[in-house]
Amino acid sequence: MTNSADIVLKWISSKGWHLFPHQRDMLHSADLPAQLLIAPTGAGKTLAGFLPTLAELASHPHQGLHTIYVSPLKALTADIKRNLMTPIHDLNLDIKVEDRTGDTSSHIKRRQRADPPQILLTTPESLALLISYPEATKIFAGVQRVLVDEIHALAESKRGDQLVLALSRLNGICPTLRRVGLSATVDDPQAITELLSGSADGCPVCLADGGPAPDISMLKTDVPPPWSGAGGRYAVEPVLEQIKQHKTTLIFHNTRAQAEIFFHHLWLANNDHLPIAIHHGSLDRVQRQNVETAMTAGKLRAIVCTGSLDLGIDWGDVDLVIQIGAPKNVKRLVQRIGRANHRYNAPSKALIVPANRFEIVECVAALEAVIANDLDGEKRGSKPLDVLCQHIVLVACAGPFDADELYAEVCTAGSYSALSRADFDQCVDFCTTGGYALKRYDQWHRLMRQPDGLYRLRDLRSAARIRMNAGTIQDSDTLKVRLQRRRGGKPLGEIEEAFAATLSPGDTFLIGGQVVRFENLRDMTVEVSRQANKKPKIAVFSGTKFATSTQLSARILSRFATKNWSGLPRHTVHWLEQQTRISTLPLPDRLLLETFPRQDLHHLCIYGFAGRNAQQTLGLLLSKQLEARGLAPLGFVATDYATLIWGLEPIKTPKSLFDPDDLEQGLGDWLAGNAVMKRSFRAVATISGLIERNLPGLQKSGRQATFSSDILYDTLLKYDPDHLMMQITKSEAMRGLVDFSRIRQMLDRIEGRIDHRALPHLSPFSAPLFLEAGRVPVEGQAVERLISEHTEALIKEAGLDF
Amino acid sequence: MSSYHFTLAGASLVALGSGALWWPEKNLLCVSDLHLGKADRAMRQGGPMLPPYETRDTLYRLEADITLTRAEVIVCLGDSFDDKLSGDRLPEAELQWISRLQTGRRWIWIEGNHDPGPMELGGTYMSALPEPPLVFRHISSSQENGEISGHYHPKAQISLRGKSISKPCFLLDSDRLVLPAYGTFTGGLKTQSDVLCCLMRPEAVAILTGKQARPIQMPRD
């Protein structure tokens, strides 16, 4: 090994480069079965990961696959491929480097299976699909190393679980496989090592020097932020100023819709025609690639983006990061600002732009936390069974499996080390029979048991359909958007099905920074025409929604308690004082409730500061209470700090809604029928294969049945409430969406101290909630009443009697 | 009352909130597009293994409506089975359930596009049922007055005080009535679609299903 390392070291010095200490360490410890490197971005993590591969390939030619590189983003693979070309050329390596993602053509994918490259750059879902081919054993036979980049990001979602399951399979095929994880700064490195190594003992960590403290502050604007709203539109001018003063600026948004809107307004003010682009996950792939290429070539002055650019290797000359909208948690902010000024030893520069007045407080609190190096952490649940179901079926596609062996193998996967045999068997049963209490479909089971005890696909032809439905773990259905042309217009990107359903011909919306007009929906594609002059309806992209962490919420509340206005601009202080005057400030040890009428509806606002998920649960529980009391609630919406409920009747005694026992007792029953659970169910059912994805190709042939997941949920609830899918949904909803523990924390904190302010109109603090997306509807008497009123009004008019 | 009374071609009819049609004068209950066995068919086509409870759920609701109205004539207005095989493959328990419902009643299966041709079940098979002043058939095909049909699975979507409401509905004008799909797991076609806008007169009414059957102007935009 020393010999091969020397070859590489010589090459490095011939380039006049120097290795960082952690890069050198990684090179020398490449024999370890598993290792985690933690370094801020710009510290050459990826190079550190690849050096041992280059060293080994330089000294011994290798047939077939040697190293697999996995990253959560398709975007990275193209870039890395380019960067690897230099050393490969210089070292005269006769090897192939190829990428394999959702964008790779099927023709190339087929060839890769038959003749794999030495280095494969891929994503978790593409890797999961790759192990589902019968040739998998051959493809992975000689694999030496797997590099998992941005493992901290994967660790936070089901994609991480999908990945470790695929890795457990790789280890089954090739037991000497060595794993390397590349991570940004995290609060709990131990957890990541456990995920990577599959063992409770974790693995060695190589900790790079953190670099100098970041230069981070709030953007100074002449115009104060609006009271409500989620974008940075008011700050367009000062942002343009900053762009002019820097080489390349990244402008991050929390949602895709906000990115689109901001980009639109930025261009309206871009009189100097600075080259500014937009980048997010819903945009067409070609467009994204163009932006990435232009960026690396230094041709862009700014890129408006979302988390799609959160992760990454060196992106050219980015020297400023602007975060629009409160960052939601400190860890993410720290990871983002690690991107600016990718020269490792210079401080990274970042500016925060709050979207509305309330967010100013949150931003200031976040700033404090960054400086104090106070990272927040959230424990994810482990062993999601829906991902396991998908894995089992994919394994079956590759060939018959033995249940005992597969169980043992799955237990070596990081998040599944504590998986019980009973849970595993239940998943196998689901994959085989559908898992229903009612035994049906014997001859149509998806898997079947051979006489020798092995499980296999009943019908090998179903493998293609299974692969099409497996893969990417996402929880929203999107439709492609194309310009209308006689023969297939230019693809612009995707929008959510739910949003597309609200469109009528003539409606306009933003995509890729341009305003388009909805023409019609044909073949599961949204056809549009260009329409530059109209004001667009907003496209709703779901994407990831983060909740403000407990730590940040606590900081904000303590500022209110001590009336600590330091660091806050004058207009914010004025707003806080207005809130104090019209209503009162929320305090750490008390709960504030406000009630007020607005536009024919009555509102109740609850400032719990428990984070979005818990606040949403609170909305649920309380609306059920209100329904029971005949107060006809219509819906609610939640943010990180408050829940707003509206209905047809005024709420006179809101304090009585907060008995802790009542709240907890009703939780199980009330959860069952609601929209939040159904949303969770939809994702779970899709990942595990119960619901097929909305795929255009199948739609045409009429073979696909698009099922409303709501109907499936209702049916299971009524006839099979303990079905595996319902169990998974419940435990996920309880943990994630529901987050009841934070409600409990809030109730403990206030110990019954509740303040109610009955106001004649809305308060300054409640304003942002009116423009918040993600309203949850309440199905109850209110709906019947509304229809009644409407019908009666119509009957009064002439012409409806038959 | 959770139902809506109206007249068509001189006959007094009642639209139930469940999506069934009742003709008190003839003691006749009519339901359309049951699509029994849909989960089974999805499975046979190599699709996912959907919960096999939709048939019993549909029968459960149908039984409730029969009990409520004490109807003696039951008309299933076509697409009662998702395909021919679904009918043959219904489990014993569900076949017996249907038999029980049929006992002592006149049961008519109208031919639909999904289930052309008679099944091995009790009852009478017809392509259309003339019952003056009305006629019952699966797909609306005539300009004659007093036609009751199904097939389109109409659903109405309206927005009230910011809330979007979508419900399966009956479509009614002076010539015809189109029934909503009664079966569990059936989807719907929006009333705004071309075919429904052409089929119904401009003054047509949509009767929403739900806890109460309620009429609104048929949404067309």
Image (cartoon, coloured by chain):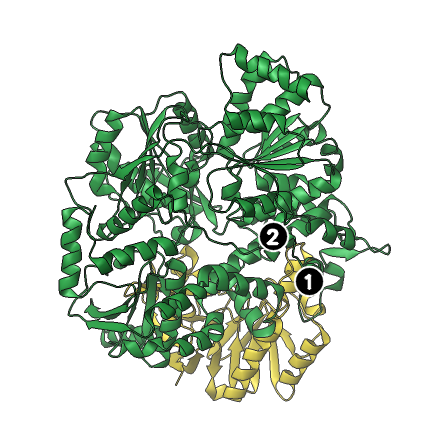
Chain colours: A green, B yellow
Give the SS element for disc 1: helix
* Residue at x-position 32% and y-position 70%: A750
* Horizontal side of residue A735 vs A528, given as left or right: right
Report the residue marked by disc 1: A426
- The amino acid marked with disc number 2 is Val
Task: Name the residue: 54% across, 59% down.
Answer: A707
Res A200 seen here:
yes
The first of marks 2 and 1 along the sequence is 2
Q: Residue at x 24, y 53 (%)?
A: A358
| Depicted A549 relative to depicted A347: above or below | below
Residue A330 position within the rendered picture, expressed as x and y whole percent measured from the top left? 37, 46
Q: Taking A384 as reference, is B152 left or right?
A: left
Expressed as whole percent of the image width and height from the top left, the position of residue A323 reads 32, 40
**Between A716 and A499, the one nearer to me in the picture:** A716
Residue A387: give its label: 2
What's the distance in space between the residues labelled 2 and 1, CA to CA?
13 Å
